[in-house]
Image: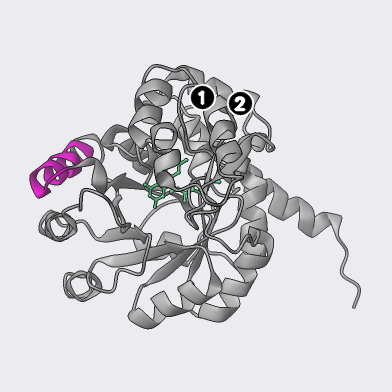
């Protein structure tokens, strides 16, 4: 059993977290994660109103009596999202854990604090971590350059970013995110000062994840080299799967004068969700995945995966203590 401040703070059996994921973080998967002893997050912006989010939270509660949370991704959007409604739904339904991302949740923190909701803020730099902690978040989840989705613009890998963040925000607990996929990742993250590990890509390749089987198989088949970075010139970098569409975006964006309008038809989230995640054509849309896919070789149930990660982490921690001798 590996106990950390994360397992104690959130009442979960393992220090494994599944962060919010667009097109992936729905109630059945989050409940499977909770039932496996890890901490999963429902992605709030799948819902268009407070009522829908209530319903999604209740759907999850019907499937588990273990703790789970809600992810609030605070990004500007063409169609503004009802964040205040989401916050009300979270508080009214008694959810006690929120993962925020995109920007520091300054405007939501007072209400969350008053309701006893703990906030894990996920960000991609030491300076943003320090600032979020000053605003009062309870935990930092630090996303290294390896991560799926938005790695920020600093290009710092987790092996440097994690301990730098741990030092900068101490004594606030830190979760290691980006590139984490197995028990070795967890053992290494603990050694670097983390109290937990956040995984996205690894949870996609599980039986309970409701994306098309072809996508899961593609994750297994892909290596760590099969991601690309889009939207670098727009300073809104995204790490996505390497395929015909993402390579076309990268090609267009080699010209720095190109704007979002030049690639909108290619990067549209709805195209990826419909054609790739829904229909299983992994070459007909943008889909989010991280370098961690190079470490993923199976499609287990969530419970098997969590068990394997925990068993391997314990073995690695024990073995490394025996393998290395420390001279006085
Ligand atoms: C398909 C997919 C969609 C994601 N969508 C979101 C999102 O909407 N909000 C968010 O905060 N993070 C999102 N993420 C990031 C994950 O929560 C997590 O931080 C990231 O996947 C960690 O990196 P890893 O994939 O290397 O484990 C997404 C990740 C994936 C794979």
Give the residue at mark 1.
Answer: 216
Mark 1 is surrounded, within 10 Å at the Cα level, by few (under 14), some (14 to 19) or many (20 or more) other residues, namely many
Above or below, 32 against 106 in this view is: above
Mark 2 is surrounded, within 10 Å at the Cα level, by few (under 14), some (14 to 19) or many (20 or more) other residues, namely some
Nearer to us in this view, 323 or 167: 167
Above or below, 216 against 44 in this view is: above
As drawn, is 79 to the left or to the right of 162? left
Specify the farthest residue to the front.
257
Q: Majority secondary structure of the magenta segment?
A: helix
Cα separation, mark 1 vs mark 2, equals 7 Å
**Quarter of image, res 326:** bottom right
Nearer to us in this view, 138 or 238: 238
Whether residue 183 can be seen here: yes
Estimate the x, y position of residue 246 in percent, counting from the top left: 54, 34
Estimate the x, y position of residue 105 in percent, counting from the top left: 30, 68
| Residue ID at (43%, 79%) | 131
Nearer to us in this view, 189 or 124: 124
Please give the label number shown on residue 184: none
Classify mark 1: helix, strand or loop: helix
Q: Are marks 1 and 2 in contact (CB under 8 Å)?
A: yes
| CB of mark 1 near ligand 1 (< 8 Å) | no
Above or below, 193 against 272 in this view is: below
As drawn, is 321 to the left or to the right of 36? right
| Residue ID at (43%, 51%) | 13
Give the residue at mark 2.
Answer: 220
**Quarter of image, res 251:** top right
Magenta highlight on residue 149: no
As drawn, is 295 to the left or to the right of 129? right
| CB of mark 2 near ligand 1 (< 8 Å) | no
Estimate the x, y position of residue 15 in percent, counting from the top left: 48, 55
Above or below, 13 against 84 in this view is: above
In the image, which residues are magenta?
A: 48-61
């Amino acid at each position: 059993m590996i106990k950390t401040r994360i397992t104690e703070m959130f009442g979960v059996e393992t220090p494994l977290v599944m962060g919010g994921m667009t097109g992936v973080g729905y109630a059945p998967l989050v409940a499977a994660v909770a039932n496996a002893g890890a901490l999963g997050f429902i992605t709030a912006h799948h819902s268009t109103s407070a009522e829908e989010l209530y319903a999604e939270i209740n759907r999850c509660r019907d499937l588990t009596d273990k703790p789970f949370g809600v992810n609030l991704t605070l990004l500007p959007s063409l169609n503004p999202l009802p964040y205040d409604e989401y916050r009300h739904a979270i508080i009214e339904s008694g959810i006690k854990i929120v993962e925020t991302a995109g920007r520091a949740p300054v405007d939501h923190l007072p209400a969350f604090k008053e309701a006893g909701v703990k906030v894990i803020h996920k960000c991609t730099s030491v300076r943003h971590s320090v600032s979020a902690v000053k605003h009062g978040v309870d935990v930092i989840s630090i996303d290294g350059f390896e991560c799926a989705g938005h790695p920020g613009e600093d290009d710092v890998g987790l092996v440097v970013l994690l301990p730098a963040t741990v030092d900068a925000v101490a004594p606030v607990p830190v979760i290691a995110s980006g590139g984490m996929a197995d028990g070795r990742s967890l053992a290494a993250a603990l050694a670097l000062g983390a109290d937990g590990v956040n995984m996205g890509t690894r949870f996609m390749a599980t039986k309970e994840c409701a994306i098309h089987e072809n996508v899961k198989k593609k994750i297994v088949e892909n290596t760590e080299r099969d991601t690309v970075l889009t939207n670098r010139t727009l300073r809104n970098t995204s790490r996505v799967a390497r395929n015909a569409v993402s390579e076309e975006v990268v090609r267009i964006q080699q010209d720095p004068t190109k704007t979002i309008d030049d690639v909108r038809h290619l990067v549209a989230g709805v195209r990826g969700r419909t054609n790739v995640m829904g229909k299983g054509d992994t070459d007909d849309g943008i889909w989010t995945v991280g370098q961690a896919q190079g470490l993923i070789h199976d499609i287990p149930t969530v419970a098997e995966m969590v068990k394997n990660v925990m068993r391997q982490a314990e073995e690695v921690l024990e073995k490394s203590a025996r393998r290395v001798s420390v001279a006085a």
